[in-house]
Amino acid sequence: MTGIVQHKGITIANTLIAVDNEGRFCLNDLHKAAGAESRHQPAFFFRRPEIQELEAEINSAPAQSLPTFTTQGRNGGTYVCKELVYAYAMWISPKFHLEVIRTFDAVATGPAPVAAPKPSAISPAKEFRAIFGIARLIGLDKNAAAISANQGTAALTGVNMLQLMERTHLATPSQEIYYTPTELGSRFVKSGKAFNQLLVQAGLQENIAGHWVPTEKGRAHAFVADTGKAHSSGTPIQQVKWRDSVLAEVAL
């Protein structure tokens, strides 16, 4: 019967993750394994548009059981498929993502060697595409997604796809380096706070609800990046970085 939890599971970060009879994993247990921070509650995870799209995509597959299922009572909780386990772990942090992948491989698919993993029967290309697709759906750019997919594929199959293709370094699309206000300010013996004020005075950024936001003029020199962290409300923390070209706009 769908949703009845069996007395079995896998252990991640010294926490037992319950598994139901459809092979779904308890996200509430995974939240505990990740540190049980309020900002990482499953409810915040499911509010993200890219996760809703991923869930819908998984659910559209032929003969696919429900990707998520919630039960009530003593053994209640939200149970999710493997793909959503990976996506949740990636949302938490790269470190936790790798820990989940390696534990899943060692416990759910069989023992993994302590030394360098042996080649697996799992198709490296197939795993790479699957993890890359999840990484893109949750908002990573192509380079970050490729790196995450390569790390996950290497952990699951023992094959380093980028090394195999002699692409150990990935070129950034713009070939430009972006700097934080602290890094730019340090060139002129100024603090990051002081440099932020110079950007405000030059009409390049403004403070909205406690966050620095580039103005229309500033967008030509700015890049907004996700930090991989989130506020207590679950809203992602973003950081504004600047090209060297911004120095011509401020009075130093």
Image: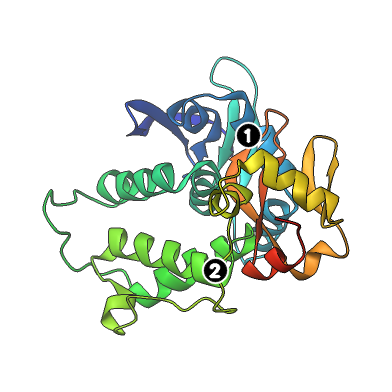
Considering the image in quadrants, where does the N terminus appear?
A: top right
Residue 98 drawn at (x, y percent): 37, 49
> Dot 1: what SS?
helix
Camera-nearest residue between 186 and 80: 186
Residue type at numbered disc 2: Ile
Q: Quick check: 199 left or right of 87? A: right
Q: Which mark is residue 177?
A: 2
> Dot 2: what SS?
loop
One can see residue 1 in this view: no
Q: Quick check: 242 left or right of 111? A: right
Does residue 131 lie above or below 201 as drawn? below
Does residue 116 lie above or below 100 as drawn? below
Contact (Cβ within 8 Å) of mark 1 with mark 2: no
Residue type at numbered disc 1: Pro
Does residue 142 lie above or below 164 as drawn? above
Q: Which residue is mark 1?
A: 42
At label 1, counting other C-alpha atoms closer than 10 Å, the crowd grade (few under 14, some 14-19, many 20 or more) is: some
Q: Earlier in the sequence, mark 1 or mark 2?
A: 1
Residue 35 drawn at (x, y percent): 47, 26
Q: Residue at x 44, y 48 (%)?
A: 94
Q: Residue at x 84, y 50 (%)?
A: 201
Q: CA distance from mark 1 to mark 2?
A: 35 Å
Q: Residue at x 33, y 74 (%)?
A: 123
Image quadrant in which you'd find residue 155: bottom left
